């Protein structure tokens, strides 16, 4: 949990870096946003207090940056501050918000911006409720409400280095993290998971924009880019940690995953053995496992295993790739 001392530290130009940055010209931002959104996010202006019904909305879900669609806040951290602007006690993750000292109007404040696209969001203050004591005072024009259950997807299908590399190239995928789930040990290490004794599978958690790619298409791509008919193995990787698994975030996702498995079963000679069950806890893997292929493209495993797999994936799903990715 972030504390005020963390905010001050980040405001001194040591903000944690996100995995990717989004850059657009001023004309591009103007064409993508409404005049109010553009005025607030790109020119650091402030909307009128009580000008949005978002202040009084508390339905479950997530709030994302209106410019780049990066998830920023959870409705569980939203509270009624009486200030006239949506207020939150914490961001979703530490590195989605950047902090900057703001000395305008004769005051000393901490400005908050989207750490991915640099959109102005609002400010953070020390008068929030416990346990954080923080109040993220955010312009409603800088946010978009998205469904919580449609925002994350979790998949396992062999080594998570391969799975991560595939999902990172899809249009509409905002972030991919490698980790462990499906077992009994709390906060396991890579070495412990590789022993096969923790019950965890190597998985990736995907944050995606459902307006650009559907959960159903993510499931189809997952099943088509590994062998879901193999029990506890993929290629040379053998063990329960490499099992084919879909961990769902809602009953709707569970129904969709099972429907897609039935839909795709005729295309396989053997029965699909992919496990489908609700997600319990996702444990983020150690930092050196994140963005593994992007950071080690010339490594032995990457050239021998991941690169050929990516080449097949790009040919099969070329229409789903992010712009600029080789088709």
Image (cartoon, rainbow, N blue to C red):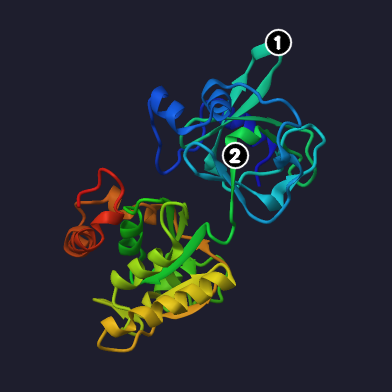
How many other residues sit within 10 Å of disc 2, few (<14), some (14-19) or many (≥20)? Answer: many
- The reply to whether residue 197 is visible in this rendering is no
Q: Which mark is residue 167?
A: none
Q: In which quarter of the image is residue 157?
A: bottom left
Which residue is depicted at the point 68% across and 22% down?
109
Q: Position of residue 316 (x, y in %)?
A: 22, 63
| CB within 8 Å, label 1 to label 2 | no
* Residue at the right extreme of this rendering: 82
Q: Is residue 4 left or right of residue 157?
A: right
Q: Quadrant of residue 201?
A: bottom left
Looking at this view, is 290 or 29 the one in front? Answer: 29
Q: Position of residue 196 (x, y in %)?
A: 42, 79
> How many badges with numbers are in the image?
2
According to the picture, the residue beneath numbered tag 1 turns out to be 106
* Residue at the top extreme of this rendering: 106
**Alpha-carbon span between mark 1 and mark 2:** 27 Å
Mark 2, secondary structure of its residue: strand
Which residue is depicted at the point 57% across and 62% down?
149
Mark 1, secondary structure of its residue: helix
**Up-down: is 237 above or below 91?**
below
According to the picture, the residue beneath numbered tag 2 turns out to be 143
Q: Position of residue 183 (x, y in %)?
A: 52, 76
- The reply to whether residue 32 is visible in this rendering is yes
Q: Position of residue 58 (x, y in %)?
A: 73, 50
Looking at this view, is 117 or 209 the one in front? Answer: 209
Q: Which of marks 1 and 2 is in front?
A: 2
How many other residues sit within 10 Å of disc 1, few (<14), some (14-19) or many (≥20)? Answer: few
Q: Which of marks 1 and 2 is nearer the N terminus?
A: 1
**Up-down: is 216 above or below 184?**
above
Looking at this view, is 327 or 11 the one in front? Answer: 327
* Residue at the bottom extreme of this rendering: 270
**Up-down: is 48 above or below 185?**
above
């Amino acid at each position: 949990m972030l504390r005020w001392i963390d905010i001050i530290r980040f405001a001194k130009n040591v903000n944690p870096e996100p995995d990717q940055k989004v850059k657009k010209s001023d004309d591009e931002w103007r064409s993508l946003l409404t005049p109010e959104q553009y005025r607030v996010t790109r020119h650091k202006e402030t909307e009128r207090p009580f000008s949005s019904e978002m202040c009084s909305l508390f339905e479950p879900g997530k709030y994302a940056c209106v410019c780049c669609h990066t998830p920023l806040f959870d409705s569980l951290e939203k509270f009624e501050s009486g200030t006239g602007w949506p207020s939150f006690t914490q961001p979703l993750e530490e590195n989605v918000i950047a902090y900057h000292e703001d000395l305008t109007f004769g005051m000393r404040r901490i400005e908050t911006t989207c750490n991915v696209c640099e959109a102005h969001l609002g400010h953070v203050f020390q008068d929030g409720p416990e346990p954080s004591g923080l109040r993220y005072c955010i312009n409603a024009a800088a946010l978009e409400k998205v469904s919580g259950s449609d925002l994350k997807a979790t998949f396992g299908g062999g080594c998570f280095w391969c799975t991560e590399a595939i999902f990172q190239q899809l249009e509409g995928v905002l972030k991919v993290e490698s980790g462990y789930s499906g077992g009994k040990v709390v906060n396991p290490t890579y070495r412990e998971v590789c022993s096969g004794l923790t019950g965890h599978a190597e998985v990736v958690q995907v944050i995606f924009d459902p307006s650009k790619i559907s959960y159903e298409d993510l499931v189809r791509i997952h099943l088509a880019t590994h062998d879901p008919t193999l029990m506890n193995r993929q290629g040379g990787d053998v063990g329960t940690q490499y099992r084919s698994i879909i961990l769902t975030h809602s009953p709707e996702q569970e129904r969709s995953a099972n429907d897609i498995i039935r839909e795709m079963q005729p295309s396989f000679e053997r029965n699909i053995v992919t496990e489908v069950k609700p997600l319990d806890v996702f444990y983020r893997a150690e930092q050196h496992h994140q963005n593994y292929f992007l950071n080690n493209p010339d490594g032995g495993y990457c050239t021998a295993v991941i690169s050929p797999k990516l080449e097949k994936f790009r040919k099969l799903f070329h229409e789903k790739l992010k712009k600029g990715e080789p088709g």
